[in-house]
Image (cartoon, rainbow, N blue to C red):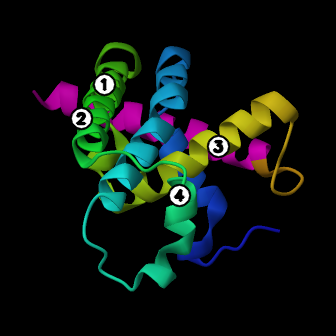
Amino acid sequence: MSNRNGLLDLEKHFAFYGAYHSNHVNIIIHTLFVWPNVFATLLFLYSTQPFLDRSQLGFIEALTFDGVLRLDIGFILTVGVASQLLCWTGQFLGHGLFEKRAPALLDNLVQAFLMGPYFVLLEVMQSGFGYEPYPGFKARVDCKIENDIKEWREEKQKKKKLT
């Protein structure tokens, strides 16, 4: 059922990101901090000059509650910077203290930024409501995650023996 064409292989992308998030404390940290980072980024985008005609930014403006959220630029930047600092610090500490593995963004920056918010959303929907994009998705992704973690640990052991 999944699309196996690389770029659109949802299982592959979720497994990549999931392999970097297997510790339960780190998962909770990311669940709490990934989406605030997304919204803080949208606040920054909201406060900059548009690179497209404003009529083309309707979706982004809707996400930032345009028309409702008419805040002063200084407040937006202060809240955005504080949110980014808190959330990024929390996520890096989660990786260093609990996961014991560098974040996914160090191996694939674009994929980590694009997949992270959706991974967290799907994890919440799966654990809270039992949602799967299609039957067997979670089992296949979990299997790939286990294999990726096993390969990473084996590679780590090889490097350790060489030093």
Give the spatial CA distance, label 4 vs label 3.
Answer: 26 Å
Residue 78: image tag: 2
* Residue 89 image offset from top left, x and y in percent: 27, 25
Give the spatial CA distance, label 3 vs label 2.
Answer: 26 Å
Label 3, residues with CA under 10 Å away: few <14, some 14-19, many ≥20:
some
From the viewer's perspective, is 76 left or right of 119? left
Q: Judge whether 95 appears above or below 37 on screen.
A: above
Q: Which residue is identified by label 3?
A: 121
* Amino acid type for the residue under numbered disc 1: Leu
Q: Residue at x 50, y 53 (%)?
A: 64
Front position among marks 1 and 4: 4
- Mark 1 / mark 4, whichever is N-terminal: 4
Q: Which residue is identified by label 4?
A: 67
Q: Residue at x 62, y 46 (%)?
A: 144
Q: Which residue is identified by label 1?
A: 86
Label 2, residues with CA under 10 Å away: few <14, some 14-19, many ≥20:
few
Front position among marks 4 and 3: 4
- Mark 1 / mark 2, whichever is N-terminal: 2
Front position among marks 3 and 1: 1
Q: Residue at x 44, y 40 (%)?
A: 151
* Amino acid type for the residue under numbered disc 4: Gly
Front position among marks 4 and 2: 4
Q: Quadrant of residue 42?
A: bottom left
- Mark 3 / mark 2, whichever is N-terminal: 2
* Amino acid type for the residue under numbered disc 3: Leu
